[in-house]
Structures are given as C-alpha cells and as structure tokens.
Amino acid sequence: MAEDQRAGTAYWIDHYVVPTADAGRFIQFYTDVFAAKPRGGDDSRPGTRFTWVGQCHVGGSPARDGKLTPGTGFPRYSWFIRKEEIAEHVARLDALGISHSAPIQTSAEGEAGTAIRFTDPDGNPLELWAPDRMPDGAMAGETAAKVGRIAAATHESRDLARTADFYRRYCGLDPLQGGQLADDTLVFPLAAAGRVIFKKVDVLGNRTLGHAVYRAIHTALVVRHDEFMPTLERMYADLPEWDFDPDHLPTLSPAEADAMAPRTGMHGNPIGAEWKRTIGRADSFFDWDANCYHFVPASPKDGSMATFNFVPQEDFLEARRA
C-alpha cells in the first residue's frame, strides 16, 4: 500500500514478547522452527530471553512461578513465507513433530494468502503466512528456514469501533473496509507491509502486559524516526500515566485490569527507566483492552520504508538533554 505520512503511522511489526514456562525451551523452539539465531544482551532483562528471526526478534518472558494460565487463542503472531515454499515448511514442521493445520487458503483477515497454523510449546498461537502478493521488503534478511519478517499480530478487543478510533488516532492507521471480513474482525493494514488484527471477544484473556500476570509482554511497531517523538508527545497530552515498575508488576484482579483506560507505561527494556527519568513520561502504551505496545524508530533506505535502518532510542534522549 502507499506509505501514509500521517503522524505516528506504523509501517511494520518489529518484534514481540510472549509468556513462557521455560525460556530455554522457547529459544530452542524458534531455533528449530524458524532457524533463529542467538541474541545477546539479555542479562539486564531478568528472565526474558530474546532470539533473532532474520531481521526481527522475539522474546520469551517466564511466568513468575513457572506455570502458565491457559491462553484464549490470542495474541497470535504470523510470519511471512513464500507461497512456492509452503510444502517445504509443512515438511519441516512434520519432521519436528509439531502439530499444525493443513495449509489454509483464506482472505478472511483482509489479505489473500495461505496460512499454516500451530502453537509453540507454551500454547502461544503462531502462523506461517504466504500472501498471494508478497510485499516489498517482507522477505528481507530471511532466515535459513526461508522465514521473513513478522506478517501480522492478532489481538483481542471488546469494542471494535473504540479500538478503531484508538489506532487511527495514535498509530496513523485506517481500518480495512469491505472485502470478506467477518463482523468480529478488525484489520489495520500497516503502511509498508503486514497487519494488526483484532478479534471481538466478550471476555479478555490475560496474556497481555496490562493484566499484570506476565512481565514484558508486548508488540513493537516501527515508525519513522522523525515521527517518533511527535507521536509520543501526542499520547502524553491525551493519556494518563500508569506508574509501575516493570520488574515488580502490580497485583491486579482481572476486573481491575479490564477496567483500565488507555495509558502510557514503562517499557521493560533498560532504556525504559532512563527514558522516564529524562522525559518525565514512559515510552510504552496500552490500548482499551490491556494490549501493550511501544514504537521502534527507523529511517527509510532509498526513500522507502520497505527497508529501513533502526535509530537508537538513546539518540532522542541525547537530543532532549542537549
């Protein structure tokens, strides 16, 4: 799709963190299935382990007591693969003994393609997604297993209209209209490639950071570096701050978590505390349904966000201090 230059427009999904009962097992799963590569620097993130999947990365955040409550089916994360290589991916899953769906030809979530669905050992849903039309940059930096960038993140929403208003305002995204979308589905095409999808539910699951059950659970969205601070400043003007320590989550009942309005809150990354000390506000945000995100600033290559260079968040702190 054409790149949208509205403030805060999200272009890609950069990474995500999901809960795990065994961080070592989590890393090994991504190594086997996605040909992920080790990612260092986790010593400063108690318990959370990350691994590279091509140019993206994923994290596993251990449960406090080593046990996970059952998931409800979301969030689900999807990865780009080529349509002509579907059989190769199916064969790899079979060889690893991973139960999966047959390839599903579908356009029910706003894009035509073929999906292979399965879960990780902790019950977090995953999908390999082969679109009928591969977007520019989607397979850049693909792994040895021929897996590209993150293709979609699917979350829960109790009120799709309210969710649409939130992401239109703060992420520069317009919901997809028409097509074969079901009444319980809301789709935001991202400005470069990929989708953020919401499914209507009556009761929220608790595999989100906003429910304060698991540490560090979030999804990260890529924005242009020149829109990074203006987008956060707009949130700071509109949204309250949830003042909590990411390493010591508050104790919330499900009802208390579900009742919280959109807000900003501290990112568990080491820069989160420094950011709040310098800026006075936190660098992550929560929507109406306890889903947590933060933005990753990036500069376009060759004038397009189809491929990009990351801009360190520390650069913005230095600019503010200056």
Image (cartoon, grey):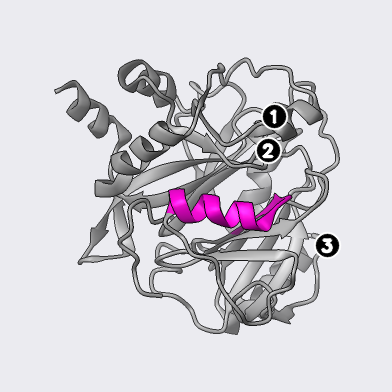
How packed mark 1 is, by other alpha carbons closer than 10 Å (few <14, some 14-19, many 20 or more), is many
Q: Is residue 145 above or below residue 251?
A: below
Look at 62% across and 80% down and name the residue there: 113
Identify the amino acid type marked 2.
Answer: Thr
- Asked if residue 231 lies left or right of residue 138, the reply is left
Question: Which residue has dot 2 on it?
Answer: 208
Is residue 87 inside the magenta stretch? no
Of tags 2 and 1, which is closer to the observer?
2
Whether residue 20 sits left or right of residue 190 in the image: it is right
Q: What's the residue at 59%, 30% (across, down)?
A: 48
State the image coordinates of residue 94 (x, y, percent, origin top left).
Answer: 78, 67
Residue 204 found in image quarter: top right
Residue 170 percent location from the top left of the image:
45, 48
In the picture of the structure, the residue carrying the numbered disc 1 is 214
Q: Residue 93 — which label?
A: none
* Residue type, mark 1 in image: Tyr
Residue 133 versus residue 165 in the image, above or below = below
Pointer 1 with pointer 3, Cβ within 8 A: no
Query: Which residues fall within the magenta stretch?
Result: 153-171
Depth order, front residue of 196/171: 171
| Most foreground residue, 313 or 260 | 260
Disc 2 is placed on an element classified as loop
The residue beneath circle 3 is 99
* Quadrant of the rendered image containing residue 253: top right
**Place of residue 289 in the rendered image (x, y in percent of width and height, measured from the top left):** 67, 42
Cα separation between marks 1 and 3:
26 Å
By secondary structure, the bulk of the magenta-drawn segment is best described as: helix
